[in-house]
Amino acid sequence: MYIYNVTINVNTQIQEPWLQWMQKSHIPDMLATGKFKAAKLCQVMVEEEIGGVTYAIQYTAHSKAALDLYYKEDAENLRKEGAKHFGNNFVAFRTELSIISEH
């Protein structure tokens, strides 16, 4: 199983509207692609030197093939939506995680 993890540092001035947009629009849009079966929105409990608030969103992909298809078919448009709404008020760092075991 694969997790697509997006860690985002958000400017505190847009934090509340960004959180609402993530929960009501972006995460549902990601799940609607059919490539992911679940999503978790977490706050990273650390103070950043650059300021802002940091969040991690973990999308559980159906498979590596589904994740690759997401990159090919959906990623660009969905990323543009965030920039359209919030400009340069956030920084995103994306990683893929392969689950080895769960207990």
Image (cartoon, rainbow, N blue to C red):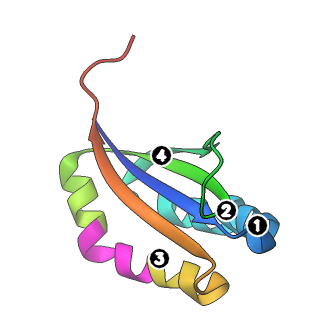
How many marks overall?
A: 4
Please name the residue that numbered disc 2 is placed on.
Answer: 51
Rounded to the nearest angstrom, the CA distance separating label 4 from label 2 is: 22 Å
Relative vertical location of residue 60 with respect to residue 89 in this rendering, above or below: above
On the rendered image, what quadrant is the C terminus found in?
top left
Start-end of magenta stretch: 71-77
SS for dot 4: strand
> Which of disc 3 and disc 2 is earlier in sequence?
2
26 part of magenta stretch = no
Q: Amino acid at mark 1?
A: Thr
> Which of disc 4 and disc 3 is earlier in sequence?
4
| Between marks 4 and 1 in the image, the one whose residue lies nearer the viewer | 1
For image coordinates 48% across by 84% down, the residue present is: 80
Please name the residue that numbered disc 4 is placed on.
Answer: 58
SS for dot 3: helix
Q: Amino acid at mark 2?
A: Gly
Residue 53 percent location from the top left of the image: 68, 57
For image coordinates 26% across by 55% down, the residue present is: 66
Residue 18 percent location from the top left of the image: 71, 69
